[in-house]
Image (cartoon, rainbow, N blue to C red):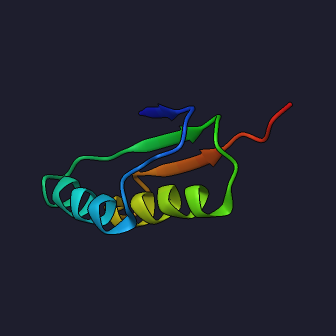
Amino acid sequence: MAFVASPVEEDEATLVALAKKLRKNNIAVDIVNFGEQKEEHIAKLQKFVDTVKKGNNCFFLNIQPG
């Protein structure tokens, strides 16, 4: 499980490559985003989770401010 509270500086291609390695090794990842609410940031995190997901073993949760 990863808690994200600041912007992810890596580009989407880097995150997707990491996600593919994790998926290949049967590693599940849950991400909870508390911080950055820009659409491109949320899209990167969602793409990462969608890539690493095998069945229903990974989840992404975005917490709105307040």
The percent position of residue 19, horizontal first and vertical second, equals 28, 58
- Where 27 falls versus 43 (above or below)? above
- Where 60 falls versus 15 (above or below)? above
Residue at 37% x, 44% y is 29
The percent position of residue 24, horizontal first and vertical second, equals 14, 61
Write down the quadrant of residue 15 in the picture: bottom left
Q: Is 13 placed left or right of 2 in the picture?
A: left
The quadrant of the picture occupied by the N terminus is top left
Q: Residue furthest left?
A: 25
Residue at 43% x, 51% y is 58
Q: Nearer the viewer, residue 57 or 41?
A: 41
Q: Nearer the viewer, residue 8 or 18?
A: 8
Residue at 70% x, 49% y is 37
Write down the quadrant of residue 2 in the picture: top left
The percent position of residue 9, horizontal first and vertical second, equals 42, 49
Q: Nearer the viewer, residue 27 or 7?
A: 7
- Where 9 falls versus 20 (above or below)? above
Q: Is 19 placed left or right of 44 in the picture?
A: left
Q: Is 37 placed left or right of 66 in the picture?
A: left
